[in-house]
Amino acid sequence: MEQPSKRSTQLDEIARTIHRGGVVAYPTEGVYGLGCDPTNKHAVLRILHIKERPVEKGLILIAADFAQLQPWVEPMELGLQNRVLDCWPGPVTWLLPARRGVPVWLRGAHLSLAVRVTDHPLAAALCREVGYPLVSTSANRSGQEPARTAEAVESTLGSQVDGILDGPVGSLSGATEIRDAYTGRVIRSQLDISS
C-alpha cells in the first residue's frame, strides 16, 4: 500500500486544524497568509487580534474555484462576471457586493467582500481539502513586513498560530492587487502589503 506523501499529510493536518477552529499560516501568491474558517467568528477575531488589525477594514476570502465563493457574494451580471473570471485563477482580488448575512467581522465596514480564486497550488489545494474558502490576510502585524517563508512566520507569529503549511510563496513580490469590480479602480497595489 502506497504511503501518503509528506505534502498530502501536512495538508490533511492543516485542514483538520482549520475544521477545529484553528488559525493557520500558508503560502499564497506573494506572501504567507493567515487563515481560518470564515464562518468561525472566534477564529476570525483571533486573526484580527494577532495582526492588530481593526475589524472595520475587512478581510479577504480565497478559494479554489468560483463555486466556493458564490455563497458569499451577490450574483453578478454577465459582463461583470466575465471581467472577474477572466482574471481567475490568478493574483487579483476583487471587491464584490457581499451577500446579505455576510458578517461584519469579515466584510468590515463595507457592503462588499474582497475575494479571490487563487492560482497558488498549495493555497488552492488547502481550500479544496477544507471544502470551503479561507480567510486570507498577510502573515504580519499591521505595519510590519509580511512573512514570505514558514521560518519567518514561526519567528514572528509562531506561538500565535495553530499550524503552518510549509511551502514556497508564488512569484509576486508582495500581496495581491485589490480592485473594485464595478469601477475597476485599484484599491491596493502589489506594493502596499503591510496591512
Image (spheres, helix red, strand yellow):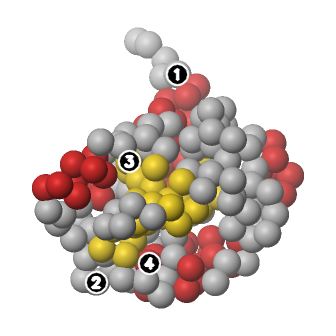
Q: CA distance from mark 3 to mark 4?
A: 17 Å
Numbered disc in front, either 2 or 3: 3
Measured in 3D between alpha carbons, the distance from the residue under mark 2 to the one under mark 3, in whole angstroms, is 21 Å
Dot 3 crowding, Cα within 10 Å, few <14, some 14–19, many 20+: many
**Mark 1 or mark 2: whose residue is earlier in sequence:** 1
Tag 2 residue: 101
Considering every residue shown, the one lying at the far right of the view is 155
Say which amino acid is labelled 2.
Answer: Gly
**Camera sees residue 135:** no
- Identify the amino acid type marked 3: Val
Who comes first in sequence, dot 3 or dot 1? 1
Reading the image, the residue beneath label 4 is 107
Q: CA distance from mark 2 to mark 4?
A: 10 Å
Choose top left, top right, bottom left or bottom right for residue 185: bottom left
Q: Which residue is mark 3?
A: 117
Which residue shows up at 55% across the image and 86% down it? 56
**Residue bearing the label numbered 1:** 5
CB-based contact (under 8 Å), mark 1 and mark 2 = no
Query: Is residue 81 shown left or right of residue 93?
Result: left
Mark 1 or mark 2, whichever is nearer to me = 2
Using residue 127 as the reference point, say whether residue 167 is left or right of it: right
Kind of residue sitting beneath label 1: Ser
Furthest residue to the left?
78
Q: How many marks?
A: 4
Which comes before the other along the chain, label 2 or label 3?
Answer: 2
Return the disc, 3 or 4, that comes first in the chain's sequence.
4
Q: At 41% across and 66% down in the image, what residue appears?
A: 180
